[in-house]
Image (cartoon, rainbow, N blue to C red):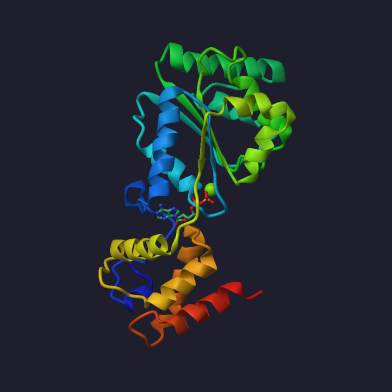
Amino acid sequence: MSAAPWAAHFGLARTPFGKSIPARDLFPRPAHAEAIARISFCVVESAPCVVTGDVGAGKTVALRAAVAGLDPTSHQVIYIANPAFGTRGLYVTIVRAPGAQPRYLKAELMAQASDLLAAETAERHRRVVVILDEAHLPGPAQLEELRLLTNPEMDSASPFAGILAGQPTLNRQLRMGMFAALGQRIATRVAIKPMDLAESAACLRHHLALAGREEPLSADDAIARLHRVSNGLPRALNNAATAALIAAASGKDLVDDACAKKAVAELTRD
Ligand SMILES: Nc1ncnc2c1ncn2[C@@H]1O[C@H](COP(=O)(O)OP(=O)(O)O)[C@@H](O)[C@H]1O
Ligand SMILES: [Mg+2]
């Protein structure tokens, strides 16, 4: 990947703050590392886990990094990015993952999904990991489907590790009536908090170093402003930093606070 003209202006070899960072290049802040460690622990234990965080906090990248660390020969990962599946959707996805043909009738389909999950473990000795991203979106009927798949005999081992990731409202949803049973089984809850100022500054340096720039590129007050406007959320920080770099590229060698202000004005304009 080459650098955009505004990035080349600063001698960067690649466009910084991009979305497609390989797992190994992610900024290893403590919240990120802890999320990966906890997700990985739940996979080993086949235990349910809930990962929450605001939009752009780093939930999906943490899931991706945790999955990247799994041995593909001993794990079957079923990642459901879009939970807006119909009522058959969850089971259909699970059945299709190993290449099976979903049965038509709902009751049969559910039994089929259940059997396939059990067979992955018992026959192929593969641990199944079902990841439901944006899990705050599905309605009660869909969460109920997931609950039904977790072992009906609550005390024996679950046939898979169910990882739910979503916005902070997810915890509340899981405490409600019919999900209390599922909610109570969730021993591991990971909340990915926003970054503090020092972390935001280090995150910006990290991205710039990946693009080939080790020397500072932004003034401290500019960094503080970018951190504030993004509330320490990595995605928003990347967008703000990109806008500030573009503003600086027309004639400056550094991102000063005037550039950051301009970027903020652009990003917050209706
Ligand atoms: N640890 C990290 N290192 C580098 N970039 C990150 C990191 N965490 C988040 N990001 C950036 O923030 C963006 C949003 O993260 P993502 O995981 O998609 O948020 P969420 O799923 O919580 O909404 C990513 O595309 C990536 O650019
Ligand atoms: Mg996400």
Quadrant of the snapshot with the C terminus: bottom right
Q: Residue at x 39, y 37 (%)?
A: 37
**Among all residues in the image, which is located at the extreme bottom?**
251
> How far across and down, in percent of the image, does residue 176 sit?
72, 33
> How far across and down, in percent of the image, does residue 154 sit?
59, 15
Q: Name above or below for residue 32 compared with residue 142.
A: below
Q: Residue at x 51, y 77 (%)?
A: 263
Say whether residue 82 is left or right of residue 26.
right
Residue 97 appearing in the image: yes
Q: Residue at x 51, y 80 (%)?
A: 261
Quadrant of residue 108 in the image?
top right
Residue 87 appearing in the image: no
Say whether residue 28 is left or right of residue 91.
left
Nearer-the-camera pick, 230 or 16: 230
Quadrant of residue 69 in the image?
top left
Nearer-the-camera pick, 30 or 99: 30
Quadrant of the snapshot with the N terminus: bottom left
Say whether residue 218 is left or right of residue 78.
left
Q: Name above or below for residue 197 compared with residue 155.
A: below
Quadrant of residue 197 in the image?
bottom left
> How far across and down, in percent of the image, does residue 4 sit?
38, 71
Nearer-the-camera pick, 144 or 20: 144
Q: Name above or below for residue 4 compared with residue 199.
A: below
> How far across and down, in percent of the image, does residue 149 sit?
61, 21
